């Protein structure tokens, strides 16, 4: 910082070097523009080839192209107007870009500081950085905790409170499975009981019983019908004779 301050202080200039170079470019672009006085401090500027016209006010330091108001440096239209008034464009540059303002900004240099080891400790709670954003996993999230190194996984308990390893098969009396998945043949086949059917299933089965399962009354009626048919057949044959 002190190098920049000494560099500008030793130069015999009125505005900063970069602003001076920008103003020189506006002076080159001002060629070909002609200014004419409209009254008071207002001028009209136009280009000879295209007849484009702008209005410049030296009192308010404005131009209708708005470049002078935004940058603080006279544009090419303002430079042509300043030349028409027989003045210098450097006098119309904003005071923020002058040498005196630049030296005021660097009048108080930053003093060197001690390292972090010698900084005084604060009694306030330290400010922690925000946590990183959570990354959404496309698959189903895991609900089971991952055991740490050397941790023994706990035995899963059933609804009754006993461990699953104590369940035994009622057929072979071996743990680890039940009788429906038992690989051994059944030890007592006579004790097998078919599964119970619901009332709805019983009604459907009764409606679909075969003829052999009909009641005796129904069988007697069928025999009578057969005998009547035989007798009728015999009578018909006799009449034909």
Image (spheres, rainbow, N blue to C red):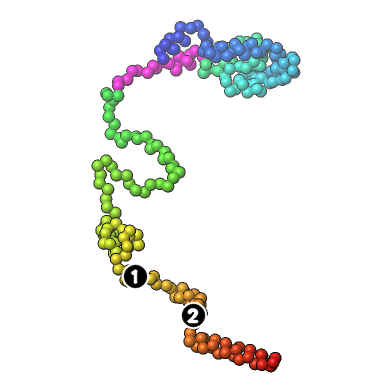
Residue at 32% x, 69% y: name it.
189
Give the residues in magenta. 98-115
Q: Is residue 56 above or below residue 215?
A: above
Q: Is residue 67 left or right of residue 107?
A: right
Measuring 24% from the left and 42% from the top, which residue is drawn there?
Answer: 150
Name the secondary structure under disc 1: loop
Q: Nearer the viewer, residue 83 or 220?
A: 220
Specify the quadrant of the image occupied by residue 182.
bottom left
Q: Image quarter for residue 197?
A: bottom left
Q: Main secondary structure of the magenta part?
A: loop
Q: Which residue position is annotated with label 1?
A: 192
Q: Which residue is mark 2?
A: 212
Q: Is residue 39 visible?
A: no
Percent x, y for residue 52?
72, 19
Answer with left or right where residue 56 lies relative to residue 106.
Answer: right
C-alpha distance separating marks 2 and 1: 27 Å
Q: Position of residue 118 (x, y in %)?
A: 27, 23
């Amino acid at each position: 910082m002190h190098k920049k301050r000494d560099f500008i202080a030793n130069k015999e200039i009125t505005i900063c070097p970069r602003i001076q170079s920008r103003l020189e470019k506006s002076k080159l672009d001002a060629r070909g523009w002609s200014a004419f006085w409209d009254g008071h401090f207002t001028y009209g500027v136009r280009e000879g080839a295209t007849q484009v016209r702008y209005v410049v006010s030296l009192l308010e330091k404005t131009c209708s192209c708005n470049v002078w108001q935004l940058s603080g440096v006279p544009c090419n239209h303002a430079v042509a107007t300043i030349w028409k008034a027989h003045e210098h464009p450097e006098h119309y540059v904003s005071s923020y870009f002058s040498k005196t303002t630049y030296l005021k900004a660097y009048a108080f240099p930053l003093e060197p500081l001690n390292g972090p080891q010698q900084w005084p400790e604060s009694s306030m709670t330290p400010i922690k950085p925000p946590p990183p954003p959570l990354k959404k996993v496309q698959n189903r999230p895991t609900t089971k905790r991952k055991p740490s190194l050397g941790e023994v996984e706990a035995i899963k308990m059933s609804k009754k409170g006993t461990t699953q390893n104590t369940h035994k098969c009622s057929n072979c009396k071996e743990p680890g499975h039940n009788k429906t998945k038992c690989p051994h043949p059944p030890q007592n086949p006579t004790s097998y009981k078919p599964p119970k059917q619901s009332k709805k299933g019983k009604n459907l089965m009764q409606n679909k019983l075969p003829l052999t399962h009909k009641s005796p009354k129904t069988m007697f009626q069928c025999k009578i019908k057969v005998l009547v048919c035989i007798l009728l057949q015999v009578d018909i044959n006799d009449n034909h004779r």
